[in-house]
Image (cartoon, grey):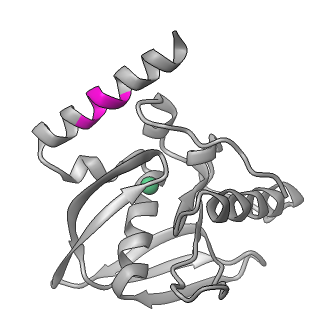
Amino acid sequence: MTIRPLVILPDPVLRRASDPVGPITAEIRTLVADMFETMYDAPGVGLAAIQIGVAKRVVTIDTSKEEGVRDAKVFINPEIIWSSEEMRVYDEGCLSIPEYYGEVERPDRVRVRFRDIDGNEQEIEAGGLLSTCIQHEIDHLNGVLFIDHLSKLKRDRVIKKFAKAAKRDAA
Ligand code: ZN
């Protein structure tokens, strides 16, 4: 397993829509293992493959809060098939937008259809942090970032800040 470098705002790669995964090959299994390694190292609760530069519809999530307990979940080709009308606000962050947080309103509960690491079709209904996290990560697969859900003013400000930092690092 390898910790892979994270793609950081304003890298245009983050705006790319990811492609569906076909058969679960050794390459996909390695990708998933590397995503968990990268996510735990960061540390973060969720990661989409595009955040390590791979445009495949793969998401890893671990929202377990207990110290030393892991609840590694992988979602391949995830799709939201139902969302609750009830909404919920959560202060979101993103490994691709380090140390920036913003309140995003999303459906409280969602039902998600996906394939597991063995290629079997699964469905789960998620609430709480898992629900927020799945919706945030599925956005990534469509080139959408959580800052797109904030006001234009806030979004422009954070993009500008990160563009400046990228320029400084490149200099
Ligand atoms: Zn993110």
Q: Position of residue 23 (x, y in %)?
A: 78, 63
Q: Main secondary structure of the magenta part?
A: helix
Residue under the point 88% across and 60% down: 26
Using the image as rendered, state which of residue 108 and residue 20 is in the foreground: 108
Q: Horizontal placement of 143 versus 47: left or right?
A: left
Q: Residue at x 18, y 51 (%)?
A: 150
Furthest-front residue in this view: 67
- State which quadrant residue 105 falls in: bottom left
Q: Residue at x 47, y 39 (%)?
A: 14
For the image, the number of numbered tags is 0
- Check the image and report above or below for 111 versus 34: below
- Image quadrant of ligand 1 equals bottom left
Examine the image and state in which quarter residue 41 appears: bottom right
The picture places residue 64, in percent across and down from the top left corner, at 54, 85
The location of residue 163, given as percent across then percent down, is 36, 24
Q: Is residue 16 above or below residue 22?
A: above
Question: Could you tell whether 78 is left or right of 25 in the image?
Answer: left
Residue nearest the observer in this picture, 95 or 75: 95
Q: Tell me the quadrant of the picture where the N terminus can be found.
A: bottom right
Q: In terms of depth relative to the viewer, which is nearer, 34 or 144?
A: 34
Left or right: residue 154 compared with residue 35: left
Does the magenta run of residues contain 160? yes
Furthest residue toward top: 171
Task: Residue 164: give x, y in percent of width and height.
Answer: 35, 21
Image point (36%, 48%), residue name = 144
Range covered by the magenta-colored residues: 158-162
Does the segment drawn in magenta span residue 124?
no
